[in-house]
Each structure stands twice: as C-alpha cells, then as structure tokens.
Amino acid sequence: MKVNRHAKIIELIRTHRIETQEELAAMLQGEGFRVTQATVSRDIRDLKLTKVPADGGGQRYAIHQDEQNGMNEKYMRVLRDGYVSMDMAQNILVIKTVSGMAMAVCAAVDAMEWKEVVGSIAGDDTIMCAIRSVEDTVQVMEKIRRIVL
C-alpha cells in the first residue's frame, strides 16, 4: 500500500543517510516493498523530499518542512485517513487507527515534530505517544482533533 510505503520512506530517510533513488529503492526492497526506480521517483515527488547537505560532504534526502511547523498536507491526510479514535492515560496518548495504518499515522505524527511529543511507538492499529505532561497531552489531542475533524 502506498501509504505504508510512504511511511517507511519517511522512517528510512530519518534514520539513514540516503543519497540516491537507487539506495532508497534498495532499502525499501530490503524492507519487503517491491518497488521500481520510477515508483521511488514518484514517491519522492509525492512526499516533497528534498536533498540537503550531509555531514561529511555529499547530500542526503530529507523531508521538506512547510511553514506550519512541519504539518504539510501529506501528513495531515495520512492522519485523517488512518485515525479512528484517541484516549489519554496521564501523559500517554493512545491513538487507535484503521488496521494496518498505525505505522503510517505514527510516522506522520513524528514528522509533525510537535515539541510536546517525546516519542511514539506503533503496532498494527494502535499508537502510544509519550507526551511531556498531562497538560501537553490535552494540547496534542486538540491538535489532532483539528486535523481529523
């Protein structure tokens, strides 16, 4: 599924120094995605990835951040498409998603780089986000509500 592949691409470019489409295609194939160079090229365009200078020279792919704290339309669409419900337990936010969408929604939440979110983990249909405080959890829930409703 395209959304899952996009989530994996975001994860890969955040955790690895990827300089070329061929490297990205190889990494995706290593993760079980059947892709061609043309598919990767379209994904790069769809995700609006850019090349930025890399430490030690060269360039690497990065997510192009828009002016709204990194919340570009792509991430908001993934969140809207996958979101089912959410609840909080103190400073833990639990987000329920459509089955198989938790990784994609989790990657979208991470990409938004909200200062309140310390980290998140995803299963098949559930995400757990560690939030800095109870008050911050309420704020993050409101941000998500504004996106999904």
Image (cartoon, grey):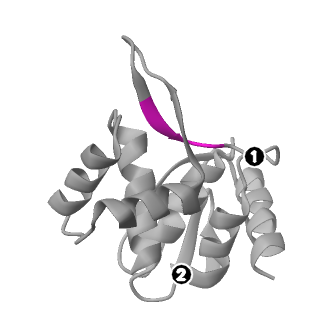
In this picture, residue 72 sits left or right of residue 31: right
Residue 88 percent location from the top left of the image: 63, 70
Screen quadrant of the C terminus: bottom right
Residue that lies at the very extreme toward the top in this rendered image:
56
Per the image, is 143 magenta?
no
**Horizontal and vertical percent for residue 132?**
64, 44
Name the kind of residue labelled 1 in the image: Asp
Label 2 Cα crowd, 10 Å radius (few <14 / some 14-19 / many 20+)? many
* Residue 66, label in figure: 1
The residue positioned 42% from the left and 88% from the top of the image is: 99
Amino acid type for the residue under numbered disc 2: Lys
Observer able to see residue 147: yes
Please provide percent x and percent y for residue 66.
Answer: 75, 46
Q: Secondary structure at mark 2?
A: strand
Give the image quarter of residue 40: bottom left
* Disc with the residue nearer the chain's start (1 vs 2): 1
Marks 1 and 2, how far apart at CA: 27 Å
- Asked which quadrant contains residue 64, the reply is top right
* Mark 1 burial class by Cα count in 10 Å: few <14, some 14-19, many 20+: few
Does residue 93 sit above or below 12 in this rendering? below
Q: Is residue 84 visible?
A: no
Identify the magenta region.
60-64
- Residue bearing the label numbered 2: 96
* Above or below: residue 64 compared with residue 44: above
Residue at image coords 36%, 11%: 56
Pointer 1 and pointer 2: residues touching (CB < 8 Å)? Answer: no
Vertical position of residue 72 compared to residue 133: above or below:
below
